[in-house]
């Protein structure tokens, strides 16, 4: 875990465990670009969702369509 994400987990509680890990290869193919490693680590840790009514995290293939990056 990167130092930045480690620090974030100290101040922002993690949600329940992910039910599935995104298929990063399929997501990158669908988007036509590589996704940053730190973004993948963030989504793998927190999943897609809305943080504190301010930050929207989009997750490829999220079960909730409102947070689905694809």
Image (tube, rainbow, N blue to C red):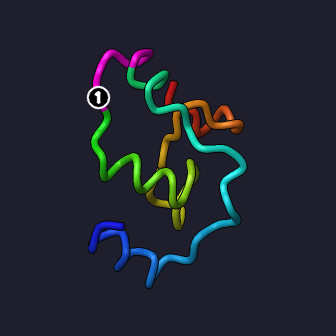
Tell which of 60 and 52 is nearer to you: 60
Q: Is residue 20 above or below residue 42?
A: above
Q: Residue at x 44, y 83 (%)?
A: 11
Is 33 one of the magenta-colored residues? yes
Question: Residue 31 sits in which quadrant?
Answer: top left
Residue 27 point in image, percent of width and height? 46, 25
- Residue at image location 67% in from the left, 44% down from the top: 20
Mark 1 residue crowding within 10 angstroms, few (<14) / some (14–19) / many (20+): few
Position of residue 57 measured from the top left corner of the image (x, y, whole percent): 48, 48
Q: Position of residue 53 (x, y in %)?
A: 53, 61
The number of numbered badges drawn on the structure is 1
Residue 58 higher or lower than 51, as above or below: above
Q: Which residue is mark 1?
A: 34
- 69 sits to left or right of 32: right
Front position in the image: 46 or 65: 46
The N terminus - image quarter: bottom left
Element on which disc 1 rests: loop
Which residue is more in the foreground, 1 or 70? 1
Above-or-below relation of 57 to 10: above
Depicted 7 relative to depicted 64: above or below: below
Q: Is residue 40 within the magenta segment? A: no
Report which quarter residue 33 is drawn in: top left
**Corner quadrant of residue 15:** bottom right
- Please report the residue visible at 63 percent of the width from the left and 37 percent of the height from the top: 62
Chain part drawn in magenta = 29-34
Q: Is 53 situated left or right of 11 in this image?
A: right
Which residue is drawn at the image coordinates 55% and 38% (left, top)? 22
């Amino acid at each position: 875990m990167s130092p930045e994400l480690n620090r974030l987990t100290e101040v922002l509680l993690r949600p329940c465990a992910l039910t599935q890990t995104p298929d990063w290869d399929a997501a990158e193919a669908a988007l036509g670009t590589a996704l940053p490693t730190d973004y993948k680590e963030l989504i793998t840790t927190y999943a897609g969702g809305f943080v504190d009514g301010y930050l929207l995290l989009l997750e490829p293939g999220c079960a909730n369509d409102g947070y689905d990056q694809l």
